[in-house]
Amino acid sequence: MKTLRETAVGQTVTVKKLTGEGPVKRRIMDMGITKGVTVYVRRVAPLGDPMEITVRGYELSLRRADAGMVEVE
């Protein structure tokens, strides 16, 4: 099981499953991160938080703790 948090900068991955619960899962889904979506990791901040990603053509920032709840392949 690999998560979005472990994905290297410059990689494109496909979301397999969301493991978060409640408001955290809702926030991730509101960003457009759902099963089957392609996510490109553009950049990670120097101290490791947040991650900058591209989802469905939108550039977003995602906390690393939240990225750990997104399983990818």
Image (cartoon, rainbow, N blue to C red):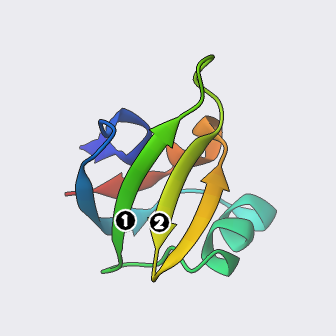
Query: Circle 1 — which element?
Result: strand
Other-residue count near label 2 (Cα within 10 Å), few / some / many at <14 / 14–19 / ≥20: some
Disc sitting over residue 27 in the figure: none
- State left or right for residue 3 relative to residue 48: left
Q: Is residue 72 above or below residue 56?
A: above
| Residue furthest left in the image | 73
Q: Foreground residue, 41 or 21?
A: 41
Amino acid at pointer 1:
Val
Tell me where residue 52 appears, x and y as whole percent. 55, 49
- State left or right for residue 28 relative to residue 73: right
Q: CA distance from mark 1 to mark 2?
A: 6 Å
- State left or right for residue 31 relative to residue 12: right
Q: Quadrant of the N terminus?
A: top left
Other-residue count near label 1 (Cα within 10 Å), few / some / many at <14 / 14–19 / ≥20: many
Q: Please name the residue shown 67% across and 60% down the image.
A: 21
| Image quadrant in which you'd find residue 50 | top right
Residue on which the image places disc 1:
39
Q: Are marks 1 and 2 in contact (CB under 8 Å)?
A: yes
Tell me where residue 35 appears, x and y as whole percent. 37, 78
Disc sitting over residue 54 in the figure: 2
Amino acid at pointer 2:
Thr
Tell me where residue 26 appears, x and y as whole percent. 72, 73
Q: Is residue 56 above or below residue 71?
A: below
Q: Please name the residue shown 49% across and 56% down the image.
A: 53
Task: Kindly report which numbered mark, 1 or 2, lies closer to the viewer in this rendering.
Answer: 2
Query: Circle 2 — which element?
Result: strand
Tell me where residue 59 appears, x and y as whole percent. 57, 67
Q: Quadrant of the C terminus?
A: bottom left
Q: Please name the residue shown 34% across and 39% down the image.
A: 9
| Image quadrant in which you'd find residue 12 | bottom left
Q: Is residue 69 above or below residue 25?
A: above
